[in-house]
Image: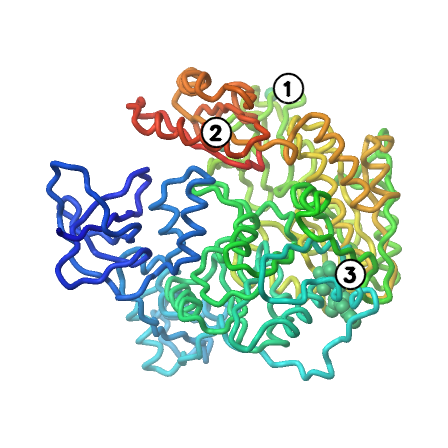
Amino acid sequence: MPRTARIALNRPLRRLFDYLVPEGMQVTRGQRVQIPFGRQQLTGLVVETDVEPPAGITLKTISHALEDWQALPPETFELLSWASTYYQHPLGECLFTALPPALRRGRPAREKEEDSWTAKSSGSELPANAHRQKALLQWMSQQPGPASTSAIIKAGFTRAQVTGLAGKELIEKAQQDHNQAGALLSPDLRPTLTPAQQNAASQLPAGRKGFDATLLYGITGSGKTEIYLHYLKERLTDTGQALVLVPEINLTPQTVARFRHYFGDRIVVWHSALNDGERLNTWLKVRRGQPVILIGTRSAVLLPFTGLETIIVDEEHDSSYKQGEGFRYSGRDLAVYRAHLNKCPIILGSATPSLESYHNARQDKYRLVKLEERAKKAVPPTLSLLDIRSRPLEGGLSRPALNAIRDTLDRGEQALVFVNRRGYAPVMMCFDCGHMVECPRCDTRLTYHRRDRAMRCHHCDYQAAATSHCPKCQSEAFKPVGQGTERTEDTLAEAFPAVPVVRVDRDSTQRKGSIQAILDKVNSGAPCVLVGTQMLAKGHDFPNVTLVVVVNADGGLFSVDFRAPEQLIQTLLQVSGRAGRGSKAGKVLIQTCHSDHPLLKSLCTENYLSIADQLMAEREQGQFPPFRHMAIFRAEADTMQNSLELLDAIKPSASGPGIETWGPLPALIARRADRHRAQLVLLSNQRGRLNAVLAGICQHLDQQKLPPKVKWMVDVDPLEI
Ligand code: ADP
Ligand code: ZN
Ligand code: ZN
């Protein structure tokens, strides 16, 4: 009897393909093979062997195996196939997500050697007409480290220009930088744990074997990272692998540096800024079972570890762990499942745990370890509300807030101002005719970006030039309304001309290395004012910041999203946590028009867990997650009617015993990039039942011939509704 194999392809198809296995070829689950598909040769992954193919079909034969080992080892394969069922995403795409781009394209699984370059000169010796070579030298001098040949080409230069400069010895070859070892800190320079840290550390699981989940609730500045370091130092064997998930590596380079001080070149990193060669090389290190400690963002949980001894998820509440498109998995949740499969401990750390994880802790599924003191002498900052009703504001800042900033700077300290919107102002409005400029493609207003005189949509990539008069009635009473980071920056620069005002948002940190330059400036400790978005709330340790001002806390108070209060409290506490991390006490001023709102009041007087208890009671009352499981079918089409029709058609199969449905309704932003979006929400307290219903609907929709412009997707455990 001929041997067969069932193959998954990197296609959004909920089906697999059967092939004959040539004489003498060994194939196993998780192995990469090359197969004929139509007129193409494609790379596939073996899912099953010796299957019974459907009768009456002549099978094609696998061309060859790309290697004789499994690209996806058993636990990784199992994790992905579980995720495919759980998130209702086609298996092929799930499996291929776990391969580095080069291997998805059928390239050989061999280390890629690539040259990196550093500039040795500014190019003054070049002839005047060597514009491109000069531009390349200038570009290189702006990079944080050596630039690889492929990065140079990606930036728009050519290989010939690189060779040209190398020939003239104006650039030189450098060691690959990304995963280079930093200086090891000599053991006696490593801080000893404080008694509170020791107490917390002693409650962490002692063994390496067996699944064991801990929620480490440690207030901001309590030294969670130090605990992770000690934990790994004590528990990880010389041959074992560890995974440390972090929300966004590029924002907090100091975290990686601290790990390198302890573990040197055992530390490798994984994040979106790696190029294909670096990705492949790191992936291979992990696959070969080298004893790495891998610090990575979301997708690192899918790497092919074979000797994983422990997993740490830092800032486990962070929404960036959830993939927002395609294979919509939660990196944190997959990490927990991965720990199950690998039978190893996992630590989820946060100063503001997600209600999901806290719920698990309250149900004794996770052990709860508390760390409620700051590591250094510093005490947690004091928070107070500043009522801004009927107070005059300048750039969104009230007098008392500006005075507090002045006092801080006068004492030689730093202040941080948090604004939740980038750009200059979220709305441009005509005070004669009332016109507000909207995005022509979305149901949103355009944000005014004054630095480059543009109007931009933050929901699609629409952009237009800013005008000084109303586009509708030509009136000149056409003014920005509301606050963005640029506007607050301008106000601060005017009010405090003697100190630097540093803006941190997606616009100001786009260039590689710019965030590092900003952090260096702040860490020098000289008085300055930082103004920025969420980016400033994430994990930074600025010892000389003693004042935090929140320009407006009211955005999340009255939202229709049931997660809004949780997210608001998390953001406010995280940004507050940047104050007073050194030896001086910190102060937080929260500007609001609702200073009597119970949620804001409890923020000033209670700790996070007791606020979380209250939020949890509300979730339970409304039977929202984590008390029920949620999934959303989203549809988008050229008309709202088409979207709603699709969802209306599936609603009967979605409704049944044990499942509640809401909708279908237009999405919060109903039109986005000219697509009309609607959604149908499903809620159930039986995960199995919900899953079965979702699977049935997905299968049904797959077989449906939909109008060409209608698209649908399913989001399990959605973070946005
Ligand atoms: P968290 O991640 O909990 O916000 P960090 O781990 O960043 O806190 O620690 C906050 C600050 O305290 C850092 O500057 C860190 O170096 C310092 N720190 C942590 N633990 C100790 C310790 N045991 N002794 C001295 N300093 C410490
Ligand atoms: Zn007008
Ligand atoms: Zn738009």
- Residue drawn at the location 34% of the way across and 82% of the way down: 168
- Residue drawn at the location 82% of the way across and 42% of the way down: 610
Q: Quadrant of the C terminus?
A: top right
Q: Are marks 1 and 3 in contact (CB under 8 Å)?
A: no
Asked whether mark 1 and ligand 2 are closer than 8 Å, the reply comes as yes
Which of the two discs, 2 and 1, sits closer to the camera?
2
Residue occupied by mark 3: 222
Residue 88 appears left or right of 198: left
Mark 3 is on which residue type? Answer: Ser
* Residue toward you, 401 or 610: 610
Local crowd size for mark 3, using a 10 Å CA cut-off: few (<14), some (14–19), many (≥20): many
Which of the two discs, 1 and 3, sits closer to the camera?
3
**First in sequence: mark 3 or mark 2?**
3
Mark 2 is on which residue type? Answer: Arg
Residue occupied by mark 2: 672
Mark 1 is on which residue type? Answer: Gly
What distance separates the C-alpha of mark 3 from that of mark 2?
Answer: 42 Å
What distance separates the C-alpha of mark 2 from that of mark 1?
Answer: 23 Å
Image position, residue 217 (x, y; %): 74, 53
Relative to 636, does residue 574 appear above or below in the rendering? below
Asked whether mark 3 and ligand 1 are closer than 8 Å, the reply comes as yes
**First in sequence: mark 2 or mark 1?**
1
